[in-house]
Amino acid sequence: MIRLTPAPTTGLHGQLTVPGDKSISHRALMFGAIAQGMTEIENFLDSDDVLHTMRIFQDLGVQITQTGTHVRIQGQGLEHFQAPNAPLDMGNSGTSTRLLMGLLSKQPFDMTIFGDGSLSQRPMQRVLAPLSQMGAQITLTDGDKLPGVIHANQALTGITYEMPMASAQVKSAIILAGMQAAGQTTIIEKLPSRDHTERMLRQFGGQIQADHGVITLSQQPTLMGQHVVVPADISSAAFFIVAALITPNSEITLKNVGINPTRDGVLRLLRRMGADLTLTHVNDGYEPTADITVRAQPLHGIQITAADIPSAVDEIPILALAATQAQGDTVISGAAELRVKETDRIATVVAELTKLGADIEALPDGMIIHGGTPLHGSNESTLLETHGDHRIGMMNAVAALIAHQDVVMTGEDAMSVSYPGFLADLMQVMR
Ligand SMILES: O=C(O)C1=C[C@@H](OP(=O)(O)O)[C@@H](O)[C@H](O)C1
Ligand SMILES: C=C(OP(=O)(O)O)C(=O)O
């Protein structure tokens, strides 16, 4: 258990570079492992989820060395993995599980995969369904959950697949299998999900087309090792952006943040709430980046609907906290995917913010937040919980900045899934 710290009356100040993007770090390991030759990753995210992906490739015999946030991978191609000696541990990571189910679906040996208690509750049939159509031989507990077995498999065939939900993990699993499949693979997306897999495949020399929600690819040429520079994670930066917006007298700059348009929905939504965010040093590359400067300012409630969700799916908890401080109501709908994250994030956001006196109701696919409530629980001290969910832990720590009371939290270790140094960085902008 830890005591969370209120913000100083002078607000939050300074410049901060949050750690590397989690989605991109996972993918850099995967492409580095299947390419030929050396891949170097700079600004790699050294967090629990990504380290699970790294250890899995080491268990498959890939030479990977890490020095802080610098990683070197000696890739030998998809045909040179070795059968692991033990089951592959996915930890808490949905991204590792779903992408690797696709990537490893044509290996000549069986692999058992398992995860922690939270991951073992999360739906995997969404990946199993298209991969089975492609010819993958994967068995899951009750047809949907970990643990499971990716069976040895000789052949995959391309399919045309209309995505039943917006999910970059499902889309990426199909792409990573489609790269090894005979014939063409076509994926049809109603709403665009994050496209880091497509961008990185191109960087490694692969070919993939994307046109108005239709993604096509075929068997790939040999991919070549690359130098990948990972941007700072916008999903981590979002906690500081909202912290500065709602903490009086604050002004902070987040450096080198990834602003891929399939990921930057949080910036668009905050602007719709009235936030004035300044982007400087905008850089285009395989993944665009910018510095983001934000000051404390008044916000107003908005309607957030299904089309807004995919590009901000992991930022809804911290946006909900911002909405408690906005004038008027914020209504979030079309966000049922939140129910199948590390926790049911509709339930856990409502539970935690309610403890602090927020006026917030759960909907089956979202929430209604009646804004303008000072955060103050009914007792002298409030006990918050992460529920084992890193993003709920960071939302709680930002809420505590403006809480008019003592706040303690259990389960703080969960934050190391995506941001092990979060509390230390928060202290840094409080000095
Ligand atoms: O592809 C990825 O790296 C991710 C995709 C999203 O999940 P879904 O694909 O389930 O939407 C997101 O919530 C997760 O944090 C990371
Ligand atoms: C949902 C998340 O990750 P994953 O699905 O990889 O566990 C997240 O980081 O918020």
Image (cartoon, rainbow, N blue to C red):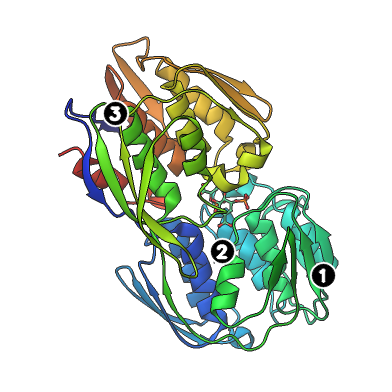
Residue occupying image coordinates x 38% and y 35%: 242
Up-down relation of residue 118 to residue 192 (above or below)? above
Up-down relation of residue 9 to residue 413 (above or below)? above
Give neighbour class at mark 2: few <14, some 14-19, many 20+ (Cα, 10 Å).
Answer: many
Q: How many marks?
A: 3
- Give the SS element for disc 3: loop
Up-down relation of residue 143 to residue 357 (above or below)? below
Q: What's the CA distance linking mark 3 and mark 2?
A: 33 Å
Mark with earlier residue (1, 2): 1
Percent x, y of residue 428 = 20, 44
Q: Is residue 374 visible?
A: yes
Mark 2 residue's CB less than 8 Å from ligand 1: yes
Of the 4 image quadrants, the one containing the C terminus is: top left
Up-down relation of residue 81 to residue 355 (above or below)? below
Mark with earlier residue (3, 1): 1
Give neighbour class at mark 3: few <14, some 14-19, many 20+ (Cα, 10 Å).
Answer: many
- The answer to which of 64 and 313 lies nearer the viewer is 313
Of the 4 image quadrants, the one containing the N terminus is: top left
Percent x, y of residue 308 = 61, 40
Q: Is residue 56 visible?
A: no
Q: What's the CA distance linking mark 3 and mark 1?
A: 51 Å
Residue occupying image coordinates x 81% and y 76%: 184
* Residue 134 badge: 1
Q: What residue type is labelled 1?
A: Met
Residue denoted by label 3: 247
Q: Which amino acid does label 3 sit on?
A: Thr
Residue denoted by label 2: 196
Q: Is residue 163 left or right of residue 228?
A: right
Q: Is residue 297 left or right of residue 311?
A: left
- Give the SS element for disc 2: helix
